[in-house]
Image (cartoon, coloured by chain):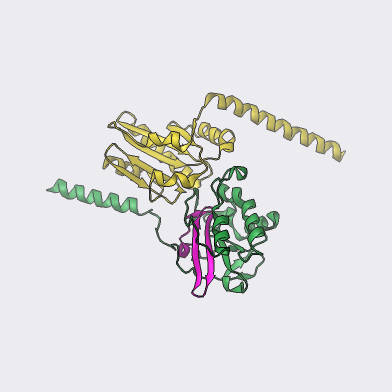
Amino acid sequence: MKKKIIYSLGLLLSILLFTSNQPIASGYGIGDIATDFNLKNTDGKMVSLKDYKDAKGFIVIFTCNHCPYAIAYEDRIIALDKKYKSKGYPVIAINPNNPEKQPKDSYDLMQVRAKEKGFTFPYLLDEGQKIYPQYGATKTPHVFVLEKTSKGNVIQYIGAIDDNYEEPKAVKVKYVEDAIDALLKKKDVVVKTTKAIGCSIKV
Amino acid sequence: MKRILHIIVLINLIGCDFKNKKVSDELSDKVDIPSYTFQEFAPMLQTKSDTLFVVNFWATWCEPCIEELPAFEAINQEYKNQKFKMLLVSLDFNKQKEKKLIPFIINHHLKAKVLHLNDPDANAWIEKVDANWSGSIPATLVFTKNKRVFFEQSFTKEQLKNIIDNF
């Protein structure tokens, strides 16, 4: 009997130990209404989705300075803004990381990167890390395409930018572009969610 | 005078780069890490034997991954004479294999088996490893022929030992 108690306690302890690090599987699904936010841009100004009166939607991308996946996608993120801002879908980049845990993702270094690469879109710091958990971003980069409707900003695509993180020239499917092209034609998004390898968010 | 100084610095820098390249060429001759597409790798995620497998997904650029590697190495040493196998599956970029992955393995004296998964269409295979995996690393798959559990988290040595002992 004693052995059983000890075994059960041991099992309970091991369950508690290994679940303590589990990521929270929550956040938005397709069709949910996305929260707005008021976050600081690298130019010092505060930015919210409601500032964009003429936008038809948004390409919200959780990204950062240091992650090699994010860096590999930087030029493609700039290209997305170039292509879709004038069509009503601007890129809104948000750094979800805690600079105390990852100093390379500090606000100062965000300013440096934005200037170096000539970002044409806001690059906001998720100060206090309150926004990314609501969206359910689990890594960088992680894209959420929002469509403005009378009900609010509806999530229409979640996931990767395309199907080849390493070689832009070898990309066969551009998930984000396909999603926005469909929305612009008032058609259904075919591939609504995808998964990608990326850097975990530093809490 | 300043120009001569610049030229000397430049020559030193170039020389430095050649020297490092030569050293890493020599080292990479001794360490061979096979690269696999997912299709080639997938059969390694199944077993009909009595062996317990621990497959860790990591990359040299992933700090929490690097932090837990000593724990995995220690476990590998502890269980190596039992029916146990560990695979450290690197998701490093293909172009970083010679420059980053191989030097990392050498500098950290990694003894566990390392292989390189080179399949950038991650969306096509993430759910084949585990349906609930979001794609973030580190992540570890533990399996025998009868049981399979996927962990999207970091491990301490004690936590990993607990999982293995109670599997």
Q: Which residues are magenta?
A: A132-160
Q: Position of residue B101 (x, y in %)?
A: 54, 36
Name the residue: 48% across, 42% down.
B66
Q: Where residue A201 sits in the image (x, y, percent)? A: 49, 55
Between A181 and A79, the one nearer to me in the picture: A181
Q: Colour of chain B?
A: yellow
| Dominant secondary structure, magenta | strand
**Residue A63, can we see it?**
no
Question: Can residue A172 be seen in the rendering of this structure?
Answer: yes
Judging depth in this view, the residue of A3 and B30 nearest the camera is B30
User: Where residue B165 sits in the image (x, y, percent)?
Assistant: 27, 40
The structure residue drawn at horizontal position 14% and vertical position 48%, both measured from the top left corner, is A2
Residue A13 x/y as whole percent: 27, 51
Q: Is residue A19 left or right of residue A131?
A: left
Q: Output the letter for the chain in green.
A: A
Answer with left or right where residue B83 lies relative to residue B122: left
Q: Residue furthest left?
A: A1
Q: Quadrant of residue A39?
A: bottom right
